[in-house]
Image (cartoon, rainbow, N blue to C red):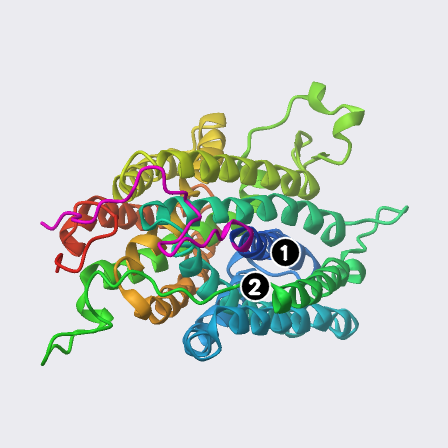
Amino acid sequence: MITSTQSVPAKKSMFVTGDGQNLFVTFLLISSLFLLWGFCNGMIDVMDKHFQEELHLSLSQSAWVQFAHYLGYFLMALPAGWLATKLGYKGGIITGLIMVAVGGFWFIPASHIAQFWAFLLGVCIIAAGLTFLETIANPYTTVLGNPQYAATRINLAQSCNGIGWIFGPIAGGMFFYSKDAAGNSTGSQTLWIPYAIVAVVVLILAVIFAFANVPDIKPEDDYHLDHPAPNDSRSIWSHPHFVLAVLAQFLYVAAQAGIFSFFINYITTQVPAIPAAWNTPIMQGWFETGKDGLLHISNKGASNLASLGFCFFLAGRFSGAGILRKIEAHKVLGLYGLLNVILSFLVFCKLGWVSVASVFLSYFFMSIMFPTIFALGIFGLGSRAKQASSYIVMAIMGGAILPKLMGAVGDHYDMSRSFIVPMVCFAYVAFYGFKWPRFSGFKGMVSVSGSGH
């Protein structure tokens, strides 16, 4: 087992690099990208129920929305990694922002075409642009200062992602589930509005980044991949901590996408009947009377509750960033994965309000998983971190495949039973976290000297 042999001055700032650059402003700009894709993802997660009702789709059929979204990531991950290497961080970010703008504006003609494929195409184009941003921004945060705080920085940046995810469902609920004075749905006519606004905002961001200080910084080369010894043909695929991180990210995003995309279906079908006393003027539109004559949460109410779930998610991100300053990242990942296995099992068991509370708690404990797996996976890979990053982003394809399985289980049984799918995924994430030191050869994710490996 290899330990760190390079001491890091305790007084060194989290955002000051080894050559003395203070990159806090750059970090804030990069964090705005996390907010952007969180907002876009949040809208995606409340879109399924809209298409189920407007186009009369089953749960597994509506999961084509997630498939199109994550297909964009899969198709563009390797090209994004290659272009990021050629264009640098700044060029890659601007390219991604322009692609997101194109996808956002496409929703205007898509609303007139009014076909499922047209909306799926827009979702896919936006995701392709977001792929550039994620491929670049995630590893970039790990080098914007003291290497000791790489996991902390990526989790802080991902907290902005959580903020975007809070407001995404609110915007989606406003426009996807809007009604006219007669009570008729107008969602099909107004769905394009939030995407057009996103397109305008990202074009402004592209201009800001064109003039901003976004230096290219080479990550720590702890495994000597940049300057290999003679006859040393090792690649990133020779490092188990990276290879298994790709699988961990595939399964984590699968679990996350399934829970997020079917949250509204779960809330509107599995939550116990609501007491009539809760139906106050303040909560107008949150509830509706079901076929059984009892009060249940409406689609709009469930969209608002999705934002509450993302508040738990955000709280987990912020608290996780603090925890990761004191506890090794792989231990936190393992523990949170194990807790989500337990919570998914409680949902599966259909325990009424206990299961409902477990869904919200799962948001909290999912919070640190994506960025922490990312940081653990690219640890020590030097300049090849960009290439490794593209493969880890490609693993997001898990969000396209397994939600369809979760939806099929929900169609056959119910949404509570479908939580067996994310439960299995979280079990592997826990395994990866607890066993990371064995896979990487390091006791913890800190910088090491050239004599380490």
Q: Is residue 451 left or right of residue 226?
A: left
| Left or right: 258 as drawn, with respect to 194 | left
On whether residue 20 falls in the magenta region, the answer is yes
Q: Is residue 365 magenta?
A: no
For disc 1, the marked residue is 47
Mark 2 and mark 1: Cα distance apart in space: 8 Å
Residue in the image at 80% along x and 26% along y: 281
The residue tagged with tag 1: helix, strand or loop? Answer: helix
**Would you place residue 434 above or below residue 38 in this image?**
above
Q: Amino acid at mark 2?
A: Val
The spot of residue 344 in percent (x, y) is 38, 39
**Residue 303 located left or right of residue 59:** right
Percent position (x, y) of residue 14?
41, 44
Residue at (29, 60) in percent of width and height: 220
At label 1, which amino acid type do we have? Met
The residue identified by callout 2 is 65
Where does residue 342 sit, x and y in percent of width and height? 32, 35
Q: Earlier in the sequence, mark 2 or mark 1?
A: 1
Q: Main secondary structure of the magenta part?
A: loop
Q: Which residues are magenta?
A: 1-26
**Contact? badges 2 and 1 (CB < 8 Å):** yes
- Camera-nearest residue between 434 and 150: 150
Q: Position of residue 338 (x, y in %)?
A: 29, 38
User: Residue at position x 19%, y 67% from top?
Assistant: 224
Q: Secondary structure at mark 2?
A: helix
Residue 8 sits in quarter: top left
Dot 2 alpha-carbon crowd within 10 angstroms: few under 14, some 14 to 19, many 20 or more: many
Q: Which mark is residue 20?
A: none
Q: How many marks?
A: 2
Q: Specify the quadrant that holds the C terminus.
A: bottom left
Q: For this rendering, which residue is in front, 79 or 350?
A: 79
